[in-house]
Image (cartoon, grey):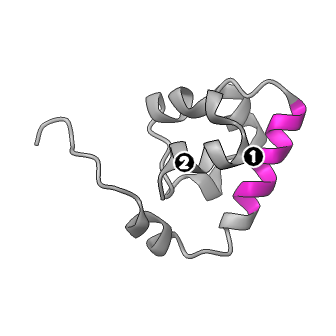
Amino acid sequence: MDIAEWLRKLGLERYEPAFRENKIGADLLPSLTAEDLKDLGVILVGDRRRLSAAIAGLRSVPVVEAAAASPSTPSPGG
């Protein structure tokens, strides 16, 4: 899963840099809390609710499938 694309589909692409800088990938999305979203800079309640609802929808997709669909990111040392 491409997080940037997912955020664009939600109309919340402005948060993509925060997700990228904090290394939030498909594997971590299902475990994000409202507090995590605040820490990521999602200060508007409506945006947090939209993200929370979309994240809840992802919980029905196995993490292995979601992670397999995301492009690999090379590790810093390799």
Query: Disc 1 marks which amino acid?
Result: Leu
- Estimate the x, y position of residue 53 in percent, counting from the top left: 81, 55
15 versus 58 height, above or below:
above
Q: Position of residue 77 (x, y in %)?
A: 12, 37
Q: Residue sitting at 79 percent across and 24 percent down? A: 43
| Marked residue nearer the N-terminal end (2 or 1) | 2
- Lateral position of residue 20 relative to residue 62, left or right: left
Q: Is residue 19 left or right of residue 55?
A: left
Residue in the image at 42% along x and 66% along y: 69
Please state which of the two labelled residues, at mark 2 or mark 1, is closer to the viewer: 2
Crowdedness near tag 1: few (<14), some (14–19) or many (≥20) residues, C-alpha within 10 Å: many
List the residue tagged with mark 1: 51
Which residue corresponds to the image point at 84% horizontal and 27% vertical from the top-left?
A: 44
User: Based on the displayed image, in which of its 4 quarters is residue 30 positioned?
Assistant: bottom right
Q: How many marks?
A: 2
Which stretch is magenta? 45-56
Which residue is label 2 attached to?
A: 5
Extreme-left residue of the structure: 78
- What residue appears at the point 47 percent right and 52 percent down from the top-left corner? 2
Q: Distance between the Cα atoms at labels 2 and 1? A: 13 Å
In percent of width and height, residue 4 lies at 52, 42
Q: Is residue 3 left or right of residue 68?
A: right
Magenta residues, dominant SS class: helix
Q: In terms of depth relative to the viewer, which is nearer, 75 or 50?
A: 50
Viewport quadrant of the C terminus? top left
Mark 2 Cα-neighbour bin, 10 Å: few <14, some 14–19, many ≥20 = few
